[in-house]
Image: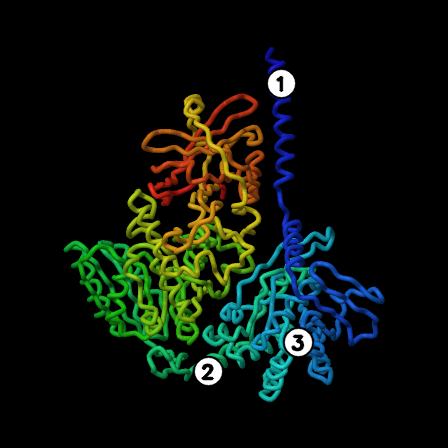
Amino acid sequence: MAIFRKKLKEKLIEKQHKRYEKELSGKKITYEKWIEEQEKILGNDENLRIKLENNLINESENRIIDGENGENEGNASDCRKTEGIYSIIDENSQLNGKTFFVYISVKNIYNNTKIIFGPENPDYIVLTLCEGDVNDLAWGMMYRRFCDPEVILVYGDEDQIDGQSGVRKNPWLKPDWSPDRFLSGFYPGSMVAVRTSALKSAWEDCRERGILDRTPPRGGELEWIYLLLFEMLRAYGCFSRRKCEKDSKVCHIRHVLYNVKQNFYEQTRGLKLPDFAEKELENDLAEETDKTNGNTHKKSDKNLMLSVIIPSKDNPEVLFHCLDSLLERTVSAHPFEIIVVDNGSGEENRRQISQRLREIKEHNTEVNTVYRYQPMAFNFSKMCNLGAEIAAGEILLFLNDDMEIVQPDWMDRMARKAALPWAGAVGAKLLYPDSDTIQHAGITNLRVGPAHKLQYLSDGEEHYFGMNRGVHDMLAVTGACLMVRRPVFWEAGGFCEELAVAFNDVDLCYTIYEKGYYNIVRNDVTLFHHESLSRGKDGESEEKQLRHLREKDLLYERHLSLYGRDPFYHPYLLNDMLDSRYSMAYCNPVTLDMPWSETVRCEKQLARAREDACLVVGMECARDIYRWLHSQPPQKAGKESVPEDAGYYFQGYSFIIGADNACYEKKFLLQNKETGRVMAVCADARYRQDIENNLPDQTNVGLTGFAARLPKTAIAAGIYRFGILAEDRCSRQKLVNWSNWVMEVEADGTESVREGKEQRGN
């Protein structure tokens, strides 16, 4: 009998494996399959019909680019691999004449500038900086961008073709124009297109000044073209958002335009501008008038004073550790003062802080100290504003009291960026203490809210094309270490005091961005952050969770145009879920076009289930669909919702540790905490590449994602928690476990979500 049961179970397991593999193959998406589908959609939507003709080399070829397809008329030849001058004829345009593209490799532009700047006089130059193929769609897309007469440079995204299999992989999805990243490395990548007149003007100017004669000493042709493009962008004012965005001089096409044979980023990781280039840029800007206060001062002046503003209360030991590291390890050319803002320390702590600041002033005659003591409820924004009001420095540095300085030149590096006229807030890379674990490397604006990409990952590894290396323009940086010129700070209105605890730093950065500045994170500046020693983590109590949610809603009420949008984060990357890595959106998509799910009562089934922590439940989304799409409820947005938006979307993942997950059938649970009623929801299984990659020691965890959509009529008012019921199809064992997310559905059908910590598969 035992042998029979064993064989029966083996048959059942085999059956479940076949079912799992079949379902997995239908849901598993590869990058190559996904990008081909995107290109098909783009091709079908492409309204521009152009004819591309080779006019330079002795070949008879006409290539029609119309959507995704190409046709050859005449001799077979692939224009994507043939250097030359091509004419572009827009068959939908009423304009007469032809537009000329030069398609040429960087080696030949360096050696044969006459081809480009000679009598052929092409309108645009397409430079390929390494071996690869131009996407057929690229020509029409580039031409269409250049129809704007202000555009002087166009770049796109790229991926890599495996030399053996021919499979496309490793996409490099780039940010929109980021001048500080450009100064840090040649991020536009392996193919760029430029307006010939702009490049020729820069080339002639550089030749007159003898600049190009100094290169290429080390970097060869790539350094030469890097410098030439830098000089062109500098001449056209592309390092100022107020000038560049108004005229749209630099255009990023958010699609893969070039397929490289070898990883271009890996080949050019060490490529830098010559030392004199950025210095010349700074010299050009040294006498620029600061329009925010009408004063003219030298931005490169090493004597600019800094005011270090540190909010702190009842944390003398932590504060003193911060101050000691600041004074002992900082080597700066800038004079600075220290302002401690205290919102009500106890008498003994107040005495200790006051005494320590007096001692610092006595032993460091060049460092002034100010102690502003003002008892009040905790309000980080107000404390920072109080410090800024009395600051004497031209540059403000907001610093948490739980920061530890570890790098001598950190202050000067940050100040060098903050002093530039296009710079807004400048931040640093923060690590968890005594480790290489990243806490902060800039803030990315996702649909789910502001996110710290790369958090908890090792800084010993380089992540996503150097996002934890070099200097990057970001939409926001953390207020734990934030430097900004005083006029820019007050132009933005200071910290919003309605945001007392959370998102006040993000709000300030968003406002600064909206005022026309670039916020910058310097990953070449590293500090330790003893995170949340001062007030604990959000999510420890229901009150804190609700406050966190209210402040996030207020953030997007103040910056509605930025909801779900970040110019420095590609739309093909994951936007709807929190993920430390730079993951592709197709790996974990939100698909609101799915049918409405059904619900059934399941209290009896739960009575026979064992609650067990080996069943991991992770909630990632539980939102009103309309608010998910538009940030605000219909009544506040002044719009009517369509029936498809009148519901809730749920998404998450679950897996059983140490078990064969292919054998389990799972149901998504909603339990009304007040009535105890439990609804089982029919959810759609989703392929989760991230879970599969992060849990190589677990069995069959590819289909651990789930998603469900419920109409509003299916959920009564109340507070709900979420769970998973998992039944082993081979043994009938039942397991249940609950997430610590909570959703409150109000009587009017709106919702709020309180979320705590989640165990994740990474």
Q: Quadrant of the N terminus?
A: top right
Expressed as whole percent of the image width and height from the top left, the position of residue 733 reads: 50, 23
How far apart are the alpha carbons under marks 1 and 2? 80 Å
Q: Hey, what amino acid is under mark 2?
A: Asn
Expressed as whole percent of the image width and height from the top left, the position of residue 55 reads: 78, 75
Q: Residue furthest right?
A: 75
Question: 214 above or below 127?
Answer: below
Tell which of 564 and 610 is nearer to you.
564
Tell which of 203 and 642 is nearer to you.
642
Which residue, given by chain and number where applicable, does mark 2 sit on? 283
Expressed as whole percent of the image width and height from the top left, the position of residue 249 reads: 55, 74
How far apart are the alpha carbons under marks 3 and 2? 30 Å
Which is in the foreground here, disc 1 or disc 2? 1
Whichever of callouts 3 and 2 sits on the residue coming sooner in the sequence is 3
Check whether the beta carbons of the residues at disc 3 and disc 2 lie within 8 A of each other: no
Whichever of callouts 1 and 2 sits on the residue coming sooner in the sequence is 1
How far apart are the alpha carbons under marks 1 and 3? 70 Å
**SS for tag 3?**
strand
Image point 22% across, 69% down: which residue? 361
Image point 62% across, 86% down: which residue? 204
Image point 44% across, 81% down: which residue? 285
The quarter of the picture where residue 82 lies is: bottom right
Q: Hey, what amino acid is under mark 1?
A: Leu
Whichever of callouts 1 and 3 sits on the residue coming sooner in the sequence is 1
Which residue, given by chain and number where applicable, does mark 3 sit on? 124
Which residue, given by chain and number where applicable, does mark 1 sit on? 8
